[in-house]
Amino acid sequence: MKRGLLIIISGPSGVGKGTIREYFMKDEGLNLTYSISMTTRSPRKNEIDGKDYIFTTKERFEEAIREGDLLEWAEFVGNYYGTPLSQIERLRKEGKNVLLEIEVQGATQVREKCPDAVSIFIIPPSMEELEKRIRGRRSEPEEVVQQRLAKAVREMKMVKDYKYVVCNDDPQLAADMITLIIRRHMEQEQEEE
Ligand code: 5GP
C-alpha cells in the first residue's frame, strides 16, 4: 500500500487555521487524520483534552522530549507544543494522509526529517485583520495578545519556506484551495505507483 501524505499547515496565531480545517476535514475523500499535539498551555473554553490537544504538564512534556517521543516540538509564547511520533508512522503506513497544524519552528524540523511533506502556510488578508481576530477571541490577557502579534510578524517571514501559500480572506475558499492542493498530491502519488 502507498504511504499516506504528511501535510503541514502553519500560519500565525489567529489566522483561522482551526476554522479552515473544520471545512476541509469534512471531505472524506481526502482520507485525512488530524495529528493531535501535546501542549503545556491551559485549555481554552471549548477545547477538549484528547481532541483538540493532549494537555499536559511541563514535566511530562520534557520527559517526552528526553524519551524521543516527539517528531518535533517548539516553545511558543511561554508554552511547549509538540507532535507525538508514535501515531504518525503507523497512520502513514496504513495509507492515511496525516495533517499537522504546527508553528514555523516545528515545521522546519519536520521538513528536515520528512522532505516529502507537503507544506502550506496560511496568511491573513492584512495584519490589521489578524489583530482583530486575535482580540476577538477575548481569551488571553493583553500581554499575551501582544506576544502573539509580535510572533505573527516574525512567523510571516517564514512563508518563503513553504510550498504553498493560501490567504484566508474567506475560510470556505481557503479550505477549497487546500482541498485542491491535497487532491493534486494524492493524484501525483497514484500516478507514480
Ligand atoms: P494555540 O495556542 O493558538 O492553540 O497554538 C499556538 C501555535 O502553536 C499555533 O501556531 C499552532 O499551530 C502551534 N502548534 C499547535 N500544535 C503544535 C505542535 O505540535 N507543534 C508545534 N511546533 N506547533 C504547534
Image: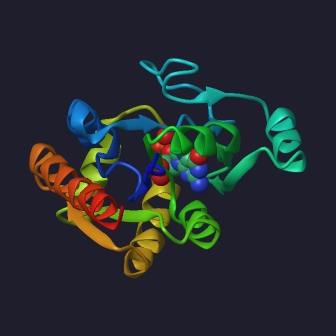
Quadrant of res 72: bottom right
Instruction: Give the answer, above or below, for where 123 lies relative to 112.
Output: above
Query: At 36% across and 61% down in the image, what residue appears?
Result: 193
Q: Total marks drawn?
A: 0
Q: Residue 130 vs residue 7: left or right? A: left
Q: Which residue is at the front of the view, 15 or 70?
A: 70
Residue 144 makes an appearance in the image: no
Q: Is residue 160 left or right of residue 126?
A: right
Residue 113 placement, left or right of 121: right
Image quadrant of residue 86? Answer: top right
Residue 84 pos. (x, y %): 67, 41
**Rendering coords of residue 129 (x, y %):** 21, 56
Q: Judge whether 8 appears above or below 142 on screen.
A: below
Residue at 67% over, 56% down: 74
Q: Quadrant of residue 119?
A: bottom left
- Residue 164 location in percent, x, y? 29, 70
**Above or below, 185 relative to 98:** below
Residue at 42% in and 60% down: 149
Residue 12: % across, % down: 40, 58
